[in-house]
Amino acid sequence: MSVATTAVATKPLRKRFNAGALPWIGPAIAVIVLMVLYPAYTMIKTSFMNIDETGTSHGFTGLSNYRTLFHNPNLVPVLERTLIWTVSVVFFTVIISLPVAQVLHAKFAGRRLVRYALIVPWAASVVMTSTSWLWILNGYYGVLNRIMLSLGLIKDQVQFLGSPTQSFAWLILVAVFVSVPFTTYVILAGLTTVGEDIMEASTVDGASGWQRYKHITFPLLRPALLISMVINLINVFNSFPIIWVMTTGGPGYSTDTTTTLAYKITFRSADIGQSASMATINFAIILVFIALFLKVSRWKEND
Amino acid sequence: MKKFTRVSAIAASLALGTSMAIGVTASHAAGTTLTMIAADYPGDGSTQQAQWTDFATRFHADNPDITVNVTVKSWNDIDQYVATQIAAGKTPDVVNKGDYSAPAAAGLLYPASQMVSASTLADILPTFLNNSKYNGTVYALPDLASARALFYNKDLLTKAGITTLPTTWAQLTTVLGTIHRKLPGVYGYALPLGPEEAQAEFNIWAGGNGGQYYDYATSKWVLNSAANVATATYLKSLVSKGYTEPNPDKCDRTACAQALFAAGKAVFINGSVFLGSWLKANGGAKINFGTGSFVSNTGHKAVTLGVQDYFTAYKANGNQAAIQKWMDFIFQPANYAKFLVAAGGFIPATKSAGAKAASDPALAPFIKLLPNAVFYPGDIASWNAVKGQIQQGIGQAVTGNPNSVLNSLQTQAAAAK
């Protein structure tokens, strides 16, 4: 980071806006405006409008959509579940990725192959992965049932995705499964920045393996950890395909998060306005998350 | 070199802009273009796209000034697709799907009298037209209908030693108990109360107990009526005894219930007219099935569920004259017959085609049940929203507390716009 700062500082400061850059940044700005800002604006506007299920607008209605949403009996349980979902998926992902990255950092025969293998669940489409898991866990024909029956672990077929609690646990497991590769790679990149010389010096000073990890490697990994956590937090919070493919938020609304609830309010309960207000609140929550993490990460930089 | 790249960057951003402009402005050529969005009926892996393309081509040959573009969408996507098109200002001219009341209430539709000529309208069965009204005016044309029957696996019944079909709930409980004892691994009744079509399954059971979703006499939703609560309580007792598949609130009609029936793992199932052909296409060709009437609670008449779908015509593009020509073309007996064949063996909505269908051995048992058919309250503007809530929630009435689940659904239905 310090290298980059010096490089910028040695360049002459630009005093005025350079119009010559526009052709290059223009398309990027156009994409941001059209694909990010405009939809966000429309979403927030829609949340204050009365739109019937045919898509016809009947003008502004003030806060009535938000009032309906706050009276929705599913809102509070879904918010609680979204919190559990996000925190537990990110937590378990990091806890698993740290040692996995450490293993992949060590030199051993076939390391390249193992590293490639880890990319597979990441490269595969999430819908594909979720569909595979859906069939693995199928209560009638699933391979997990088959294996457990053959091993005598269970006496009768188990409906893994039947009860709300159990299916939610499986959803978390699958979400961790698809998040681990990315997180591992970010941490792995962080590990390569830890200098050999520091490690050697600490060994000479008589530090044990665990002491070296705790006092040198882990503190130096913080930037990489923070980045992977922010990105995971946003991804997991907004995650739609895993839940939708595996349980469609069911039974009932018992495995919905705010994202799938917003979808259901539009396309099942046919209430576009209420759904837009759910999406707007979702958007606000994610902005708070991002702001918090930007603050934390900057604080670490200045440290 | 530098100048060159700058020029090409400008060219690139211009190209981006123009391509978007083209996307927006491309529209009216000479003559009228009708857009139609149609749901894809076949459940056996085929699609109606070829049939609609053939209709559009032949229609254009007869009417060179009218071009029809038909987009065929799956049942899963069509509601969402139509709503998105309307919200984006690209309102279609004709839609073929399962509901009409919300756009009728919003004033978006031509009345049926303007959709087809008087002679075509006279050929459509009055029963079905009656179910297509909003505030007394017919706003949609029935395209076809289906009815349900109780399908049963004859071989499994023989194996369990059951010789008479149950007609009352009490008899059904006994029969299911016998199946449970004698045929381990087989579920007596496949109960699909998962989101796909929970509203249909529950409607049939409730109907057999005198229950319904909407009370026309008081103009109110009555989801938590005593009859409905009793129905859910009865179903819950079947579930808890293991007479149905576990977790009926997760069990969708196609992927779960029909699949169990096709695999010979369920004895009874509520099946539509097309279940026979679906079984053939989905690994259940060997299932030796029979069809009969549904079961009712003592003191009530057994009902079947009649489901009809609709053609609706939107006013937004002002193409009334062209729409009328196109709809008349679809309802010409020869074309309408092709439509029914492509859709896959449904009950026709016209008198002329209905006369022929009554002698069709595959359709006859269903047509026989039609006089006792109950229909969805499809003419109530909020039906689509309430249907969505029922699909999501009613399964939990048989796995959780029937009273509180139905009360919660009632509250949501009463609030639906």
Image: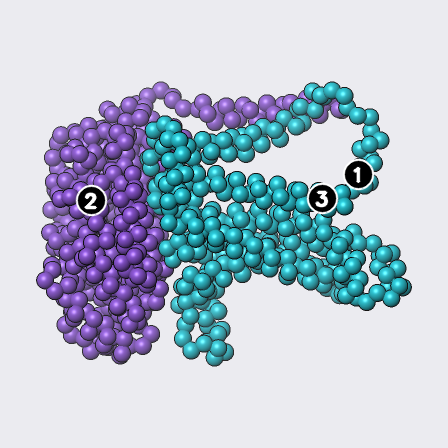
Residue A197 seen: yes
The label on residue A80 is none
Using the image as rendered, state which of residue B158 and residue B172 is in the foreground: B172
Q: Secondary structure at mark 3?
A: helix
Quadrant hosting residue B1: top right
Q: Is residue A143 above or below residue A233?
A: below
Image location (x, y in percent) of residue A109:
75, 65
Using the image as rendered, state which of residue A265 and residue B98 is in the foreground: A265
Q: Residue at coordinates 77% horizontally, 57% vertically from top-left?
A: A217
Image location (x, y in percent) of residue B317:
31, 25
Asked if disc 2 and disc 3 are in contact, CB closer than 8 Å, the reply is: no
Q: Is residue A11 above or below residue A278?
A: above
Residue at mark 2 to residue at mark 1: CA–CA distance:
69 Å
Q: Which chain is purple?
A: B
Disc 2 marks which residue?
Answer: B220
Disc 3 marks which residue?
Answer: A299
In front: label 2 or label 1 = 2
Residue at mark 3 to residue at mark 1: CA–CA distance:
18 Å
Crowd band around label 3 with a 10 angstrom C-alpha radius: few (<14), some (14–19), many (20+) = few
Q: Secondary structure at mark 2?
A: strand
The amino acid beneath tag 3 is Trp
State whether discs 2 and 3 lie on one chain: no
Disc 1 marks which residue?
Answer: A4
Give the quarter of the figure containing the C terminus of chain B: top left
Circle 1 chain = A
User: Is B366 positioned to the left or the right of B26 in the image?
Assistant: left
The amino acid beneath tag 1 is Ala
The amino acid beneath tag 2 is Lys
Circle 2 chain = B
Quadrant hosting residue A26: top right
Residue at mark 2 to residue at mark 3: CA–CA distance:
59 Å
State whether discs 2 and 1 lie on one chain: no
